[in-house]
Image (tube, rainbow, N blue to C red):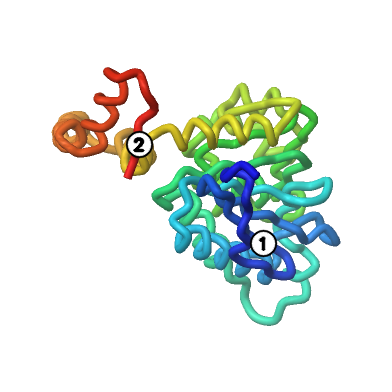
Amino acid sequence: MCLAHRVTVLGMGELVRVAVDGGGIATITLDSQRNRNALSRALVAELSACIDDAEAADARAIVLGHEGPAFCAGADLKERAGADGPPDSSPMVDVMRRLMDTDRPTIAAVEGAVRAGGIGLMASCDLVVVDESVTFALTEVRIGVAAAIISVPILRRVPAGKIAAAMLTGETFDAAEARSIGLVTHVTTDVPAQVAALTDGIKLGAPRAVRETKRLLRQVPTMDRDEAFDEMRALSDELFGGPDAQEGMAAFREKRPPVWP
C-alpha cells in the first residue's frame, strides 16, 4: 500500500471523526446526518477536539469534509429553541478562530448544500473546494437574526458589496456565484481529486515555508506598508539563510526532489 494511503484514526466521536494518512494529511469529517450536520453543541465540541488531535499529530494540512447530502445546515435551531439560559456562541467562535489561525493550511471539501453558520465554518478555511452543484444561503434574517459571528471570516474573503444581497435577503446562490465573489477558491466536478491535488502541492513545500506563507497571507494585508516590508524582509533573509532553503536550492540545482526535515 502507498504510504500516503495508510490511514490512522486519531479521534472518533459520535458526530465528528478525524484520521491522518501516511502523508500527514488530517481529514476531519462531519457526520451528523440526522440534522444535516447542524452546529449543535456536541458537534462543535467534537470538531474542536478533532482539531486538537490533528495538531497533536503535526498534520501537514487539515481537510474539513462531511458525510451526507449537506456540508452543514448552520445552527441547530431545535437545540437553540429548547435551550435553557442565554445562548453562547463562544465555542463556535473558537472553532472558526482555530481553523483560521492553526499553522497548517485548512481546506474545506464541500460536496453538499451549505447554509447560514455552515458558510462561516467553510469560510474559516484557507481553501474552499466545492462541487459545482452546491448551493449556499445566508438565511439568518429569515429567522430574525443576523449573520453576525460568521461575518468575520466571510467578510475577510468577500467584499461587503458583493455579498450584501445574499445577507440581506437570504436568497440562494450557486457555486459559480460563490467563486466569482471570492467565497470559495475552487469549483469542480470531482472534489476529492481537487483536494488531493492541493494537499499534494502542500506536501511539496517545506513545512516551515508553508506555515510562514499561511501567516503572511493573514497578517500582511492588515499591516502598515513599511512595517510589512520590514517584517517580511527579515523573514525572507532568515528563510534564505536557513537549512530548508539550502536543501531546496541544492535540489533545484541537482534536478531532484528536496528532502525536508
Where 189 falls versus 215 (above or below)? above
Would residue 57 be found to the left or right of residue 82 on screen? left
Looking at the rendered structure, the number of numbered marks drawn on it comes to 2
Q: Nearer the viewer, mark 2 or mark 1?
A: 2
Residue found 62% across the figure and 76% down from its top: 86
Look at 70% across and 66% down and name the residue there: 40
Along the line of sight, which residue is nearer the eye, 145 or 175? Answer: 175
* SS at badge 2: loop
Q: Is residue 261 visible?
A: yes
Q: Where does label 2 land, which residue?
A: 259
Please, what is the three-letter code of the amino acid marked with disc 2?
Answer: Val
* Front one among 107 and 70: 107
Would residue 1 appear left or right of 208 to someone viewing this image?
right
Q: Position of residue 157 (x, y in %)?
A: 50, 35
Q: Residue at x 61, y 59 (%)?
A: 8
Q: Secondary structure at mark 1?
A: strand
Instruction: Tell me the kind of residue under disc 1.
Output: Arg
Q: Residues within 10 Å of mark 1 (few under 14, many from 20)?
A: many
Residue 245 pos. (x, y %):
24, 32
Across and down, in percent, residue 47 comes to 61, 62
Q: Is residue 233 above or below residue 94?
A: above
Query: Residue farthest to the bottom?
Result: 84
Horizontal side of 157 relative to 210 (left or right) equals right
Which quadrant would the C terminus be assigned to in this image? top left
Q: Residue at left 59%, top 64%?
A: 10
The residue singled out by tag 1 in the image is 17
Mark 2 or 1 closer to N-term? 1
Quarter holding the N terminus is top right
Q: CA distance from mark 2 to mark 1?
A: 31 Å
